[in-house]
Image (cartoon, rainbow, N blue to C red):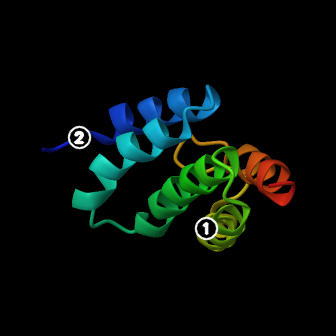
């Protein structure tokens, strides 16, 4: 299944913003699996951010912090924004919600 970038990112942002982190991960992963471009780590980082926040909300603080660290490593080079995504806001939310997990 081919998913277009704009639809995948818009779906990710809507789900992520609404706190539906598992859905955000699933939406963007469909695009990322087939993507072979130069921003692969960027999309991986967004997916990891969603997974980390899902773990934090699900009571898995160790998993949340572990995946969050990988997400930060993948997303930091793209801050403050990239490809229309407010990366700084994603990193901020990730830091706030996984540090207390």
Q: For mark 1, what is the residue?
A: 67
The location of residue 94, given as percent across then percent down, is 74, 52
Q: Quadrant of the N terminus?
A: top left
Q: Is residue 85 above or below residue 99?
A: above
Query: Which of marks 1 and 2 precedes in the sequence?
Result: 2
The single residue placed furthest to the front in the displayed view is: 59
The location of residue 81, given as percent across then percent down, is 66, 49
Give left or right: position of 49 versus 40: right
Q: Residues within 10 Å of mark 2 (few under 14, many from 20)?
A: some
Disc number placed over residue 88 in the picture, else none: none
Instruction: Label 1, secondary structure: give it.
Output: helix
Q: Nearer the viewer, mark 2 or mark 1?
A: 1
Q: For mark 2, what is the residue?
A: 3
Question: As rendered, which of 41 and 54 lies closer to the eye?
Answer: 54
- The structure residue drawn at horizontal position 67% and vertical position 64%, both measured from the top left corner, is 68
- The structure residue drawn at horizontal position 52% and vertical position 30%, both measured from the top left corner, is 15
The location of residue 89, given as percent across then percent down, is 75, 44
- The structure residue drawn at horizontal position 44% and vertical position 36%, both measured from the top left corner, is 23
Give left or right: position of 11 versus 17: left
Instruction: Label 2, secondary structure: give it.
Output: loop
Q: Quadrant of the C terminus?
A: bottom right
Question: As rendered, which of 1 and 65 lies closer to the eye?
Answer: 65
The location of residue 44, given as percent across then percent down, is 46, 63
Q: Residues within 10 Å of mark 1 (few under 14, many from 20)?
A: many
How far separated are the C-alphas under marks 2 and 1?
Answer: 25 Å
- The structure residue drawn at horizontal position 55% and vertical position 32%, both measured from the top left corner, is 20
Give left or right: position of 97 versus 29: right
Q: Is residue 7 above or below residue 81?
A: above
Question: As rendered, which of 63 and 5 lies closer to the eye?
Answer: 63
Q: How many marks?
A: 2
Task: Evaluate if marks 2 and 1 touch, with contact meaning CB atoms under 8 Å apart.
Answer: no
């Amino acid at each position: 299944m081919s998913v277009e970038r704009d639809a995948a990112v818009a779906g990710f942002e809507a789900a992520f913003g609404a706190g539906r982190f598992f859905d955000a991960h699933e939406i963007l992963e469909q695009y990322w699996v087939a993507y072979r471009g130069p921003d692969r780590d960027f999309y991986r980082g967004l997916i990891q951010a969603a997974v980390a926040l899902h773990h934090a909300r699900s009571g898995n603080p160790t998993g949340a912090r572990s995946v969050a660290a990988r997400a930060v490593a993948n997303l930091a080079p793209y801050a403050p924004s990239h490809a229309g995504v407010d990366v700084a806001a994603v990193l901020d939310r990730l830091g706030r919600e996984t540090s207390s997990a």
